[in-house]
Amino acid sequence: PFYINSPEYDKSIKPYPYDSSTAKQLLDEAGWVDHDGDGIIDKKGVKFDFEFLLPSGSVTGEQISTILKEELKKVGIRMNIRRLEWAVFTKQLDERKFDAVTLSWVMGVESDPYQIWHSSQAERGSNFVGFKNKEADQLIEQARTEFNRKKRIELYRRFAEIVYKDQPYTFLFCRKSTVALQRRFKGVKVHPLGLDPLEWFV
């Protein structure tokens, strides 16, 4: 949940490996089996079938959804892609009317996870997936009032562990951004964490 080059990002947390055979095994153990032989796993008469929303015109969204659909099909899960105009897409998000969705964030050098992750934001805020975890709430609240940067980083890293274990989101990548600057700005330096406008002068 933190920018990859920030100290809050815990590099000791390794992404789950891609392993479709283990995924299939876990699904079998959970009772998701293709009982009727139609290629779609089911449990108690319910098919593992869901809708994946993305904004129309999103090249990245199209690429992600195409790969996901094909890979999920291999383990018997049917994913239906639904493309929506941006206004309709954001309305569906706000109303929490979706099964799964692809989103992207633009993050600052140090991010406050409250808006996206605190349970108080699950109904009307940006916590679109309805993530609720009491310990996560406490860590977020404590970090917001902690002036000691080292202690705050420790709190955020523990928070990241919780997000990793609960998996409300699956993080895919962190892309580079392109910026353009007017020549009249001086003192501009590109740091690993990004640009710092406080260094600039005209």
Image (spheres, rainbow, N blue to C red):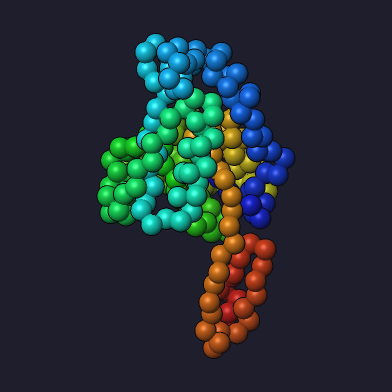
Image location (x, y in percent) of residue 148:
64, 50
Residue displayed at 62% across by 78% down: 188
The location of residue 70, given as percent across then percent down, is 51, 37
Above or below 23: residue 129: below
Q: Is residue 178 above or below residue 47?
A: below
Closest to the observer, 156 or 89: 89
For this rendering, which residue is in front, 134 or 2?
A: 2
Tell me the quarter of the image containing the N terminus. top right
Left/right of residue 31 with respect to residue 6 in the rendered view = left
Q: Quadrant of residue 37?
A: top left
In this orientation, does residue 136 appear? no
Say which residue appears at 30% left-offset and 37% top-offset.
97
Q: Can you say which quadrant of the picture contains the C terminus?
A: bottom right
In screen coordinates, is 103 left or right of 197?
Answer: left
In the image: residue 16, left or right of residue 70: right
State the count of labels: 0
Q: Is residue 37 visible?
A: yes
> Which residue is at a point 37% across and 13% down the rendered structure image?
45
Q: Position of residue 183 (x, y in %)?
A: 56, 87
